[in-house]
Image (cartoon, rainbow, N blue to C red):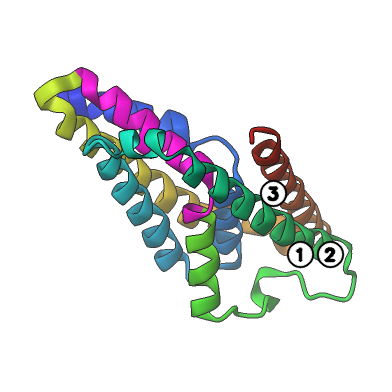
Amino acid sequence: MFSYMMSGFAVGMSLIVSIGAQNAFVLKQGLKQQHVFWVCVICALSDSILILLGVLGFARVIEHYPDIVIFSKYIGAGFLFYYGLRHAISAFKSTEVLAPSGQLTEHFLQVLMICLAFTWLNPHVYLDTVILIGSISTQYALGKWWFALGAVCASWFFFFSLGYGAKILTPWFQHPKAWKILDAIIACTMWGVAVSLILSI
């Protein structure tokens, strides 16, 4: 049982730690210290649902209806290009208040919708959770639910560590240049993922 959970945890962590649009968003919310708890909950809960769907066999459904993935790639790429543009503009603005304490608080519903979009409009999430983790879980037969639990725990551990651990970096982000660099990196990350989505269609 424990070995199944640890295997699931290891697989989950290996898939989630890569730099992506969702992780960049969680990091920035953590630095701004705005709605961190709910952002982490939404990301982790969404991942948990997708992982469980994968273990239940929904990977076969996606494989039989590839148009769903293709459609989500177009929508996801469009969203990422737009959000990347927003960060690119922020990186070049010199009049914006960039210190964490001076950041304008974004409306909760706005943050909620953006967070959901980063998760559910990102085809990579489906490939990693539903298809990959779902496929790997079949190797564990009766232990697949313990494997899934380990992967779910990895998601919750990672997002909360990223969201609340971002405070450690706060001293470096008291300077406008640090925020400009972060915005530029996030913009490039968003655009890079968007291009990869388009090229994979």
**On screen, 102 above or below 124?**
below
**On screen, 67 above or below 22?**
above
Residue 19's label in the rendered image is none
Label 3 element class: helix
Q: Residue 45, how many percent across, how many down?
A: 33, 55
> Which residues are drawn in magenta?
119-139
**On screen, 78 above or below 146?**
below
Q: Mark 2 and mark 3: span between their CA atoms?
A: 13 Å
Quadrant location, the N terminus: top left
Q: Residue 150, how many percent across, how many down?
A: 25, 35
- Residue labelled with disc 1: 86
Q: Mark 2 and mark 1: span between their CA atoms?
A: 5 Å
Label 1 element class: helix
Q: Quadrant of residue 61?
A: top left
Residue type, mark 1 in image: Arg
Residue type, mark 3 in image: Met
The answer to whether the residue labelled 2 contacts the one labelled 1, judged by CB atoms less than 8 Å apart, is yes
Residue 89's label in the rendered image is 2
Q: Mark 1 and mark 3: span between their CA atoms?
A: 10 Å
**Is residue 58 covered in magenta?**
no
Residue 190's label in the rendered image is 3
Q: Quadrant of residue 147?
A: top left
Name the residue located 89 percent from the left edge and 62 percent from the top edge.
92
Asked if one can make out residue 1 in the rendered structure from this viewpoint, the answer is no
Quadrant location, the C terminus: top right
Give the mark, 2 or 3, whose residue is nearer the N terminus: 2
